[in-house]
């Protein structure tokens, strides 16, 4: 059985303290004891094997000893997900899938057909991303942005763009240039349940975005994110 994994943003060699919620989970839920091994991740690509040194009586303080820290390379494609955020529970699923599949940044966008104000928050999304990071053993946490207006997001986008399009949106996506995608990064645009408005879709395509579809059916947001990421990875080889 592999070692249990914990989030430790302040990672260094020697003795380190787990965050209180991670310490409580380790001591009260998983019932780790002094001398047991565990794996630490800081969300910035660093991992470390550690050994539990001390646990406080209440379990809210846990110190462990780190011998060596390893750096895991960044994914070769930096993917930024521009997403019209759905309801909170669905957004949690989206953040989880995106973290497990290596998305480097999530930017919620406020669209014409989307909810006027997302009912989630960066703090709750971060906790979901941390759980997904530990589950998938992907040591890179995505950057989580505050929601931004669609036009603002589009004006600042500099990546190679792909539009998560409904089947009627046009021609299939041509094979992208992997080197350009590595250098500039990738933007994947996914709209709300009602889709992007015609003006929004035209604006994205007008900036050179490639329409990307998965089969003939219209997908819900939580289905579209992993499906389109999988299709994107396949296109990039």
Image (cartoon, grey):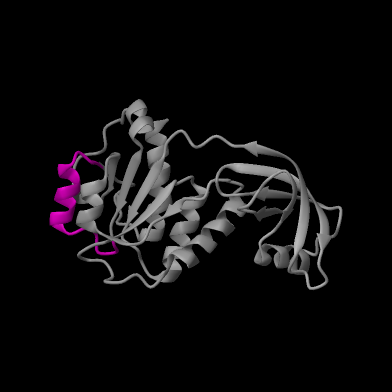
Position in image of residue 52 (x %, y %): 81, 54
Position in image of residue 202 (x %, y %): 14, 49
Residue drawn at (36%, 26%), measured in percent from left and top?
Answer: 179
Position in image of residue 80 (x %, y %): 37, 46
Position in image of residue 33 (x %, y %): 85, 60
State the image quarter where residue 223 is shown.
bottom left
Depicted 151 relative to depicted 123: above or below: above
In this view, the residue in front, 227 or 4, is: 4
Residue 122 visible, this orientation: yes
In this view, the residue in front, 224 or 6, is: 6
Residue drawn at (38%, 31%), measured in percent from left and top?
Answer: 182
State the image quarter where residue 148 is shown.
bottom left
Depicted 147 relative to depicted 35: above or below: below
Q: Is residue 163 left or right of residue 140?
A: left
Residue drawn at (67%, 55%), measured in percent from left and top?
Answer: 6
| Badge count | 0
In this view, the residue in front, 56 or 180, is: 56
Residue 166 visible, this orientation: no
Query: Where's the C terminus, which quadrant?
Result: top left
Q: Is residue 234 left or right of residue 13?
A: left
Residue drawn at (37%, 34%), measured in percent from left and top?
Answer: 235
Depicted 162 relative to depicted 88: above or below: above
Is residue 201 on the magenta stretch? yes
Is residue 209 on the magenta stretch? yes
Give the residues drawn in magenta, as a range: 192-210
Q: Is residue 217 left or right of residue 133?
A: left
């Amino acid at each position: 059985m592999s070692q249990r994994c914990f989030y430790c943003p302040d990672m260094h060699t020697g003795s380190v303290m787990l965050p209180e919620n991670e310490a409580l989970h380790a001591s009260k839920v998983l019932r780790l004891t002094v001398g047991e091994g565990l794996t630490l991740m800081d969300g910035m690509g660093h991992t470390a094997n550690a050994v539990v040194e001390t646990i406080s009586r209440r379990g809210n303080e846990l110190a462990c000893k780190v011998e060596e820290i390893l750096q895991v390379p960044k994914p070769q494609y930096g993917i930024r997900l521009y997403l019209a955020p759905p309801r909170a529970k669905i957004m949690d699923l989206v953040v989880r899938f995106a973290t497990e599949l290596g998305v480097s940044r999530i930017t919620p966008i406020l669209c014409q057909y989307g909810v006027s104000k997302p009912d989630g928050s960066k703090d709750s999304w971060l906790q979901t991303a941390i759980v997904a990071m530990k589950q998938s053993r992907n040591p890179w946490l995505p950057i989580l942005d505050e929601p931004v207006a669609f036009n603002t997001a589009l004006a600042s986008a500099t990546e190679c763009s792909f539009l998560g399009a409904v089947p009627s949106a046009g021609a299939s996506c041509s094979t992208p240039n992997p080197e350009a995608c590595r250098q500039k990064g990738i933007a994947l645009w996914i709209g709300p349940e009602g889709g992007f408005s015609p003006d929004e879709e035209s604006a994205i395509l007008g900036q050179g975005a490639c329409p990307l579809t998965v089969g003939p059916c219209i997908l819900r947001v939580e289905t579209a994110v992993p499906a389109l990421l999988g299709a994107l990875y396949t296109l990039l080889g």
